Image (spheres, helix red, strand yellow):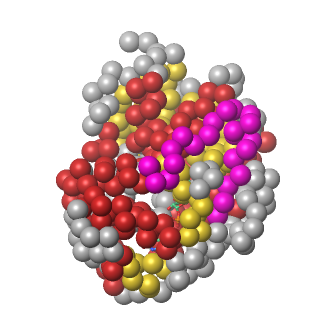
Amino acid sequence: MSFEKTILVTGGAGFIGCHVAKLFVENYPNYKIVNLDKLTYAGNLENLTEIEDAPNYEFIKGDIVDETFITDLFEKNQFDSVIHLAAESHVDRSILNPNEFIFTNIVGTTNLLNAAKKLWENGFEKKLFYHVSTDEVYGSLGEEGHFVETTPYDPKSPYSASKASSDHLVRAYAHTYKLPVVISNCSNNYGPNQFPEKLIPLCIHNIKNNLPLPIYGKGENVRDWLYVKDHSDAIDVIFHHGKTGETYNIGGNNEWTNIDLVRMLCKIMDKKLGQNEGVSEQLITFVKDRAGHDLRYAIDSSKLKNGLGWEPSLQFEEGLEKTVDWYLSNGNWLDNVTSGNYQKYYETQYVQR
Ligand code: NAD
Ligand code: DAU
């Protein structure tokens, strides 16, 4: 079978990556999608059952930090484009152990850039290296203002510093070697398939299991939440219509303090579990704050909206309900990902706080 393009998606077994892989495999049968993933604790092939037998899809297990493996993979598959999502993604883990973040997020990204540069050395026409990044590279906002694409970088955690470093490398390859790149920086995602270490799925898991809901500090930190399928739609739009060399911010225009968000989630969970309103809220437990906790993120995505016509499609309450429904009807998924080392991680993070 011959395909119009062969696209490497990295990190396609993770939370956002699985939605991106599914969207591209299902909507573009003329593209071959190769999903490269190391299957760390955050990667899960159960996220991809809908497409595993699709004729335009292939999964390869591998590590982006392995330079020889990556160079050979590009040579063998002759990729036209890369959509790079593989990363260590959890801020708390980066505080516990920054080294994995340096290897995967910085060295791994550099290996991919070198392999793309080598493969495409005879011409960059119709080639694209799409780097998926985060709003955390911009640092922390006070009570006012929004991140725009020109906001100076000011990363504060080992995670965001490693992502900022990878963004700088992508831009440096574009400037120095003329590699065709595009970068997007997105706000907090939520939705199906997110590993239950992040705030929303952690709280869903804990309410289900009658465990405490750990709120860092006073719960006054603010995040701008976006449904994961809106993020993958934005990636689709930018991949096809974004201008090479540009950066696009992606956000939900949907700011919530953590405590207000968790209270709303508790109400939805009470309703879905058929229990009296107020039962889940009793699980809220204020715990020691995250070290260096960024106060507020808020994204201005008007460049993407005005330039390429993308905007979020879901209201937050609707998105949260869909998310809760997914977790409640995918109990096996939740049980599987919380077996093994999860309990040990949970104890390190919360019981010892
Ligand atoms: P995730 O942790 O759920 O998934 C990461 C995936 O990368 C996993 O499947 C994992 O197995 C894979 N991976 C990790 N190290 C690897 C390596 N060395 N080689 C190959 N594969 C490896 O992450 P996510 O939340 O889906 O985030 C995906 C991307 O989007 C990341 O680059 C992240 O920085 C960015 N991002 C995330 C959010 C968010 O709210 N989750 C927001 C903005 C940007
Ligand atoms: O902004 C984009 C970023 O959003 C992504 O780049 C990251 O990959 C992603 O993990 C996310 O980072 P956050 O640190 O904002 O997400 P997290 O879900 O870990 O935390 C959300 C907020 O909730 C944050 O203010 C910390 C707080 N929190 C988190 C956890 C896990 C708690 O109060 N209690 C918790 O148990």
Taking the view exactly as shown, the residue that stands out farthest to the top is: 1
Viewport quadrant of the C terminus: bottom left
301 within the magenta span? yes
Residue at 51%, 48% (x, y): give it: 315
The quarter of the image holding the N terminus is top left
Image quadrant where residue 344 sits:
bottom left
Q: Position of residue 184 (x, y in %)?
A: 64, 45
Q: Where in the figure is residue 198, as x and y percent of width and height?
A: 43, 64
* Residue shown at the point (45%, 44%) measured from the top left: 17
Relative to 240, 15 lies left or right: left
Up/down of 14 relative to 147, above or below: above
Left or right: 195, with 220 as reference point: left
Q: Is residue 319 visible?
A: yes
The residue closer to the viewer here, 42 or 175, is 42
The magenta region covers 297-318
Provide residue 27's location: percent of width, then percent of height: 45, 24
Near-viewer residue (116 or 94): 94
Residue 159, located in which quarter of the rendered image? bottom right
Q: Nearer the viewer, residue 267 or 82?
A: 267
Left or right placement of residue 31 versus residue 347 in this view: right
Q: Is residue 133 visible?
A: no
Taking the spot 27% from the left edge, 45% from the top edge, the residue there is 46
Residue visible at 33% across and 21% down in the picture:
55
Count the marks: how many? 0
| Above-or-below relation of 30 to 103 | above
Q: Is residue 161 above or below residue 108?
A: below
Q: Does the magenta portion include 276?
A: no
Residue 176 image-quadrant placement: top right
Up/down of 100 relative to 288, above or below: above
